[in-house]
Amino acid sequence: MSTRSCRSGSIRSGQSGSRARAPTYHRKSSTFKSYRPPQGQRRGGLAIRGSRGTESMLFTDQQMADDLLATVPKLHAAIMMDAQSSPLWRRKGCKGGIAAYELVPSSDRSDDMDLAYASLAKTEIKCHLNEVLNVLISHESSDYQSTMAALCGDKFRDGRVVFQQRCHFSDESRKTLSGSNPEGVEGQKVLITVNRATLQPMLHMKFQSKKHRQPQKLCFASFTHQYASKDRAVHVMKTLPKHVHDELVPRSERTALRNHLDHLAVGFDVQSKPAPAGSSSPTTTIVAHGYAAVTPPEAFGAYSPDPLSRIAAPNKSQVARRRAAAMNPEAKHVLDLLTRSLREFERVIRRRRFGFQSFVYFHTASVGARELKSCSICQKRFSLLRRDFFCQLCGHMVCRDCSQLYEVEAHIGEVRTNRICVECVVRVDACKFEDENLIAALGPTVVSDDRWFSDSETESLDDDLETASLAYSSPNEMLHDQLASGDPVTRSQALEQLGRLVSPTASGSMQSRPKRRRKHKTKTIKEEPPRDLSEKVRWDIEHHLKQSLRVAEKHTRPEDCEVAGSERDYAFEFDGSRTRDPNHPLPPTPEQDKESKRLQYINNSGVLDPTFDRSALNLLAQVAAKQLNCPVGYVSMVGEKTFHAVGTFPQRPPEMNVAPRDENMCAHTVYADKPLVVKNPQRDMRFAQMPIIKDAGVKFYAGFPIRAPDGAIVASLCTSDFKPHDNISTKEYATMETLAKLAGQLVAPRQLPAAAY
């Protein structure tokens, strides 16, 4: 039995008239069998494969969309109705900020006869709408398992994502989806998913018959749609039709759908309001509406008594008996479990916010220091009755009243507990968590590339290496001598060739070069090495990066790519007189000896001299930016009090290349003494309040140390972007390392004067 999704296509409302065979999504990759119907008939959906290898479509994506869309009016009706004042809803209680309601028969005989049971829950959370969607949506089975276990606790045993596809709805479908607000739906995509969940029964069910106390295995189809206004989204999940469900899960394992019940559904309506004055986080309202229906979605509203008929609508007691006869405790348990999961939304959101922070696990103050004797927040002295605790986020001592234990999820599914003070909680909440896929950002920083070069590029490198090796054996030293030469003619020729390498037409010329070389080699056995300086410099620069990457490709693995992690060895220090925002922590300072040596290297390099020609550094910054797909690249030097951008791409006015040392990210790279990759600084308490991050909207930073021959950091090669990057590849890591070494030959003195030691 298998399922498969098709990633392309369009969804429209209405019944599908085509019987074209669709591709299938296999649960096991080892049995994958690709099938592509004609382009005009390409579709996806759920399919099964029989014992003889024959495939049959169970549920097309078209039918799945129609089935899900038919449940949306039920969600809209529940939202439009004020549950707090409506006689159709009875309040069941308010716990953890969640108001819960249950549907009851009405006195005016206006009951929805499609439903056997319905529940509703509502809450407000100070968070971005995308943070809620990241709780509701899971792209991987491991993410789904972890999130549902957090929302449902030990009642959730297992989960899996078996189907997922993003597609469009037609105009008719958009009207159904928008309800009373038809604006903001045009052109937007929806995400359709099928998840399989195994839920534990309630405690009292374990004492019933074996048939009813076993776990429930249910397959939910769901779709998620975010409106164009970005302030509202709808997420609906519904059990698959019984004839489809029984093909995926044995009937005996889904007793919640027994007898007259047709399906279970839960809808989430998420609406966000702008942050009020003085607040950094918007307020998001979540309404969860779950119901059990005796009528299939396509037949909703079929039972509606005619006012002229002699047969009266059922009264209140009749409706109650009818619903009780159709409903079962397992279905009620499933619906209540899913709607009341709203109680855990804020906990999951908060622990992921903390997952983007860096922590320190031991205090750095000396024994007997004043800050160890009293709480850094309330200033009360520690005593036998007022114990001291350590905030693992800021690194200061606090009391029990000013701190609390919080869950931290730095990687999906890996949850730990850290003590965090109330001031750090406020600072983290002031960060921005508005990215569409926060779950992916909690993954590894460096990921592997399956292949760094194509066949044609590899063949070209073979030819280039063979020819280049005939000319000289030490290109690095020659490259430094030519680019850093005091002769204007030599430097001009070197810069001209470096500019040609990174120009928009360079790639085209490089692709055609191997063909000419191979053609030439067929005529002569050995190609004469280039004799003029211009040609040698071109070879140096052109081969330096690619040949270095080819060597690095063989031994570069993600686990070998060292980057600064989320664990610090210093406490945060705050000084509003040195930073624009008092909640922006000062960057750490390296040890005195190391810092003095680093500053001496910078002074001896001469790069900060106004007459220094920075053209080569500008071009290296351009190469770095393009290799990491970033719009900005720069080479930076961090002085004693000032940050200098000594090479930039694109070019900027000189006054924009200088900033205070305390308000830039490169100071953290210098302290870390290793590459620093920040997927989105706006999520990190260390950087969120920096002027360059807050005002310019920088959402990605990668800084690689530029070292002197003895390993001291002289500068940093950096790239930044205005959109977040979930990771960098091993090829990108090796590229930045290679370019940083090349930059080191330009800015780092060969050795320090004896007095510097």
Image (cartoon, rainbow, N blue to C red):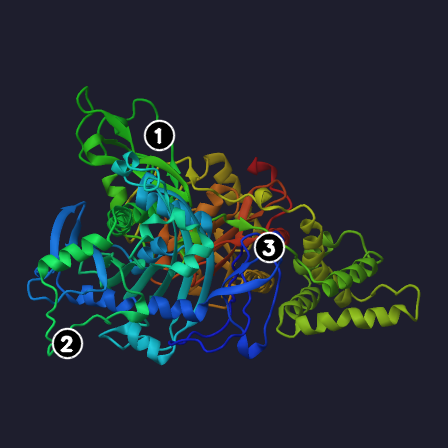
Q: Amino acid at mark 2?
A: Asp
Estimate the x, y position of residue 215 in percent, counting from the top left. Answer: 36, 42
Q: Is residue 107 visible?
A: yes
Whether pointer 2 and pointer 3 mark residues with C-beta atoms closer than 8 Å, the reply is no
The residue under label 1 is: 363
**Mark 1–mark 3 contact, CB under 8 Å?**
no
Q: What mark, if any, has residue 33 been given in the picture?
A: none
Residue 51 bears which disc, if any?
3
Q: Is residue 408 left or right of residue 86?
A: right
Report, in whole angstroms, how far the alpha carbon at label 2 lies from the one at label 3: 51 Å
Identity, as a three-letter code, of the amino acid under mark 1: His
Report which quarter residue 743 is drawn in: bottom right
| Residue highlighted by disc 2 | 306
Quarter containing the C terminus: top right
- Give the x, y percent position of residue 616: 61, 62
Looking at numbered disc 3 in the image, what kind of residue is underneath it?
A: Ser
The residue carrying pointer 1 sits among few (fewer than 14), some (14 to 19) or many (20 or more) residues within 10 Å by Cα, namely some
- Out of 443 and 420, give the one closest to the viewer: 443
Taking the spot 38% from the left edge, 78% from the top edge, the residue there is 170
Query: Helix or strand or loop: what does disc 3 sit on?
Result: loop
Q: CA distance from mark 1 to mark 3?
A: 63 Å
Left or right of 397: which side holds 700?
Answer: right
Q: How many marks?
A: 3
Q: Would residue 690 be visible to someone looking at this image?
A: no
Q: Earlier in the sequence, mark 1 or mark 3?
A: 3
Q: Secondary structure at mark 2?
A: loop
Residue in the image at 51% along x and 71% along y: 43
Label whose residue precedes the other's in the sequence (2 or 3): 3
Q: Quadrant of residue 210?
A: top left
Tell me the crowding category of disc 3: few under 14, some 14 to 19, or many 20 or more residues within 10 angstroms, Cα based: few
Query: Residue 687, position in %: x, y?
Result: 37, 51
